[in-house]
Image (cartoon, rainbow, N blue to C red):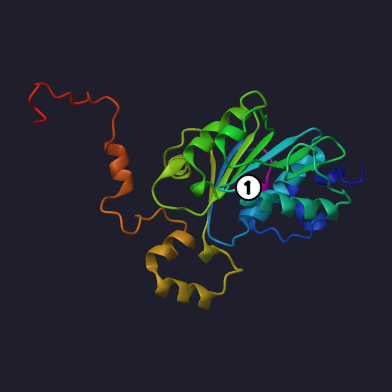
Amino acid sequence: MKDAKYAFDPTLFARERLEFPVDAQQEKVLALGHSRGILNCSRQWGKSTTMAIKAVHRAYFVPKSQVLVVGPSERQSGELVAKAREFLRMVGVKPRGDGRNATSILLPNGSRIVALPNLEKNIRGFTASMLLVDEAARVPDDLYDAVRPMLAVSRGELWLMSTPDGKRGFFYEEWTNGTEAWLRIAATALECPRYPTEFLAIERKRNEAKFRQEYLCEFVFQEGAMFDEAVVRRSLSDDVEPFVPRGKNLWR
């Protein structure tokens, strides 16, 4: 097999076959051996492209792989699948749909890459070899809870990638409190040579809080909120007995 040297080296595959200039942080994401990963990165860093490469490498070299993509909308997850389709063309694979899902790719080796709907009731019944959650900070918690069981039997990989969106939701919780063996990678705009320095300076002057969230990958206090969301969430408890009023004349 002429591509055998790339099977255990996704970075080499990306650079030589896909002509993608992988940087040091992206190389960590593409490396094999991690079953759980969280990518907390700035806008336009290349997270969807990097994950599309990861999906293609898995589907291309491991027959009958089931790579599933979830996002805040089917259009969002479909963008990642579209990138994967272009990369497959570069390695000589003519992508076609799987005949069952609207946004999907079926490879000749039986592998599939599928963008799932963003409705919890419409995604049951899938099993995943690799599950990618794009723009995870904006994906509802109930959808995340619905897709995790897809990995139970396959023991597949789970990757979350997003720019932060406040101190809330599963992306924030997994990043700060997750107990699994997550590979956590923070990729800020200041560490990325592709960002012009003058552009970042202008963005910072426009809105410091937004800059810290969108470019420095910080989980900032939500603008307009009266209380810190993380503090409120920690104050909630299911152990408190509900107050039940007594007395027939109480509400008169």
Provide residue 189's location: percent of width, then percent of height.
53, 64
Provide residue 61's location: percent of width, then percent of height.
81, 40
Instruction: State the residue lying farthest toward the top.
Output: 247
Magenta segment range?
29-33
SS type, badge 1: helix
Query: Is the residue 7 above or below the residue 148 in the image?
Result: below
Residue type (three-letter) at the residue carrying disc 1? Glu
Q: With 239 as the anchor, is 216 left or right in this view?
A: right
Residue 183 on the magenta segment: no
Residue 154 quadrant? top right
Query: Is the residue 113 above or below the residue 14 in the image?
Result: above
Residue sitting at x 72%, y 44%:
55
| Majority secondary structure in the magenta region | loop
Q: Residues within 10 Å of mark 1 (few under 14, many from 20)?
A: some
Q: Quadrant of the N terminus?
A: top right
Instruction: State the residue lying farthest toward the right.
Output: 1
In this figure, what is the number of numbered marks?
Answer: 1
Query: Is the residue 25 above or below the residue 158 in the image?
Result: below
Provide residue 114's location: percent of width, then percent of height.
71, 41
The residue indicated by pointer 1 is 74
Provide residue 180's location: percent of width, then percent of height.
51, 33
Residue 150 quadrant? top right
Q: Nearer the viewer, residue 47 or 223?
A: 223
Residue sitting at x 77%, y 40%:
59
